[in-house]
Image: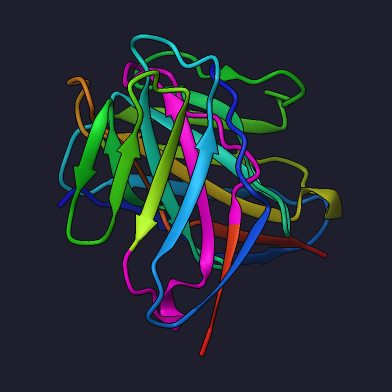
Amino acid sequence: LAKTTQPISMDSYEGQEVNITCSHNNIATNDYITWYQQFPSQGPRFIIQGYKTKVTNEVASLFIPADRKSSTLSLPRVSLSDTAVYYCLVGDTGRRALTFGSGTRLQVQP
Amino acid sequence: GAVVSQHPSRVICKSGTSVKIECRSLDFQATTMFWYRQFPKQSLMLMATSNEGSKATYEQGVEKDKFLINHASLTLSTLTVTSAHPEDSSFYICSARVGWAEGSPLHFGNGTRLTVT
């Protein structure tokens, strides 16, 4: 399974755009890139998933360069409620589980 | 949308007793479910893969006789922590996929906080 590397923590202010980059140098051809958000004492919540180029939904955007060795989660205009841990996971969508890395702890200040 | 439900959300038990945690897929069938464990300030660690109608697959270092997994139906997997000890206190989370089509993401339950006294 491809290993991921993310910054341990990030700080931001309300209303700013936050970009969290994840490195996954040994991503495989069949692997998708998925981002999850986790609040304390809750299970991870699916944010966005992509394979290549750019994906956008009502919550975030995911940018994936052509070599797919990294990806960037973009959260537009964050609020205090976006304070959470964000995990980047890489893996195929077959019957195997996904392996969690250390995640990025995002702290949004007023 | 797809929902994975866990019960109970919190449980406190005495050392030496057993605790059962249920994981249900509410609006879809899940032939495979995954059980994770998370200690405070740490990431999720995969414990085992639960397969409907067959034995679970455990990750290295996870005792299968201590963490009993039963996946008797397409919508229910249970994790039983047998003879629990304080070091088993943790946050247990299950997950499942809606189907196996390319690009199907994992959905997670809200977790079960186990405290062993």
Q: Residue at x 33, y 74 (%)?
A: A77
Nearer to us in this view, B13 or A58: A58
The image quarter containing residue B58 is top right
A4 relative to A30 in the view: left or right: right
Task: Determine if residue A43 is in view.
Answer: no
Q: Is residue B84 magenta?
A: no
Q: How many marks?
A: 0
Q: Quadrant of the N terminus of chain A?
A: top right
The answer to whether residue A80 is above or below residue B61 is below
Range of residues picked out in magenta: A76-104
A107 relative to A88 in the view: left or right: right
**Residue B117, horizontal then vertical, whole percent:** 83, 65
A17 relative to B60 in the view: left or right: left
Q: Residue at x 27, y 51 (%)?
A: A61
Nearer to us in this view, B12 or B89: B89
The answer to whether residue A2 is above or below residue B68 is above
The image quarter containing residue A91 is top left
**Residue A49, horizontal then vertical, whole percent:** 29, 38
Nearer to us in this view, A101 or B53: A101
A74 relative to B115 in the view: left or right: left
The answer to whether residue A83 is above or below residue A30 is below
The answer to whether residue A29 is above or below residue B11 is above
Q: Residue furthest top?
A: A29
**Residue A4, horizontal then vertical, whole percent:** 58, 31
Q: Residue furthest bottom?
A: A110
